Image (spheres, grey):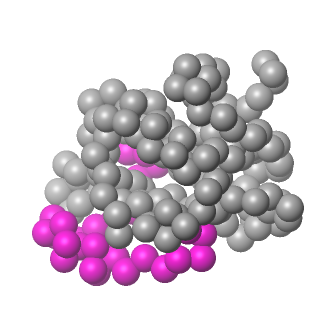
Amino acid sequence: MSNRRGPAELYNLLDSLQIIYEYIEHPPVPTVEEAMKYWSGIDSGHCKNIFFRNHKGDRHYLVILYYDSKLNIRELEQKLRQGKLSFASDRRLMQYLGLTPGSVSPFGLINDHNRHVHLFIDKTLLNHERLSFHPNTNTASLIIPREGLFRFLAHTGNTYEFI
């Protein structure tokens, strides 16, 4: 399937890691609200992904949440002791994950060669056998087994913890 949207490098990596995926094309969906229109009949834990920076700008965090979960940013700030967190700029998103706004996904970690980005994963996602993410573009979604996400993270080497 050579006409898949997203970087060939990602699909090659998923294949080499033997991560089975279901590919679904759709119009651009930069927000969860937009994406919900296309979820009918897709059995997976749908995710929203938020990219943060600390107040100094020297640490970056990717938060992966179940789509309807609420993030308590103050609680996360207290846990990290890194001062105030804010959304990372478009420039930082491109610099660390190689992504543009609306396409944020853990698959962007293929571009984080220094393993700079730390992940926080909503433990609610452990209740889902399959998870869906953009393949680094918001015009498609990939549904992968939950274990596939952790196999992918083991390959990238980025640190993560559950919230």
Tell how many labels: 0
Q: Position of residue 60 (x, y in %)?
A: 29, 51
Q: Is residue 137 above or below residue 79?
A: above
Would residue 28 be visible to someone looking at this image?
Answer: yes
Is residue 128 within the magenta segment? no
Q: Position of residue 67 (x, y in %)?
A: 60, 69
Q: Is residue 128 above or below residue 147?
A: below
Q: Residue furthest right?
A: 41
Q: Is residue 5 left or right of residue 51?
A: right
Q: Quadrant of the N terminus?
A: top right
Q: Is residue 49 above or below residue 109?
A: below
Q: Is residue 62 left or right of residue 128?
A: left
Is residue 92 within the magenta segment? yes
Q: Quadrant of the C terminus?
A: bottom left
Choose between 145 and 116: the one closer to the eye: 145
Choose between 151 and 157: the one closer to the eye: 151
Q: Position of residue 26 (x, y in %)?
A: 83, 48
Q: Position of residue 141 (x, y in %)?
A: 71, 46
- First to last magenta residue range: 65-94
Residue sitting at x 60%, y 39%: 136
Q: Is residue 98 left or right of residue 30?
A: left
Q: Quadrant of residue 92?
A: top left
Residue sitting at x 85%, y 64%: 40
Residue sitting at x 60%, y 62%: 128
